Amino acid sequence: MTAIDETQVRQLAELSGIKLNEDEVPEVTNRFQSLIAELDQLKELDLDGIEPVVIFPDED
């Protein structure tokens, strides 16, 4: 699992221009960690033989 801490959340907020109060940092960190955990589960999927889907085909 990819870990993220409060320092990284503060840096991400600053880089993305999101104003984050100091009292919001623990909750945002917790939610971010939950999201990362869910995304990490996707790595476990067996996608052999599944072709990618083109949602927006190139228009010539």
Image (cartoon, rainbow, N blue to C red):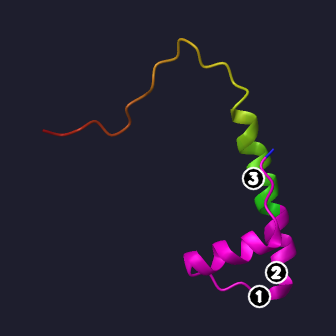
Residue 32 image point, x, y percent: 76, 60
- Which residues make up the magenta segment? 2-30
Relative to 50, 2 lies left or right: right
Residue in view at x 56 percent, y 81 percent: 17
Residue in view at x 77 percent, y 88 percent: 21
Classify mark 2: helix, strand or loop.
Answer: helix
Q: Amino acid at mark 3?
A: Leu
Check disc 2 and report the residue beneath it: 24
Residue in view at x 67 percent, y 18 percent: 46
The relative height of residue 55 versus residue 26 in the rendered view (above or below) is above
Relative to 58, 30 lies left or right: right
Cα gap from disc 2 to disc 3, whole angstroms: 17 Å
Report the label total: 3
Q: Which mark is residue 21?
A: 1
Q: Does the stretch in magenta take in 18?
A: yes
Cα gap from disc 3 to disc 1, whole angstroms: 20 Å
Classify mark 3: helix, strand or loop.
Answer: helix
The relative height of residue 23 versus residue 15 in the rendered view (above or below) is below
Q: Which mark is residue 35?
A: 3
Classify mark 1: helix, strand or loop.
Answer: loop
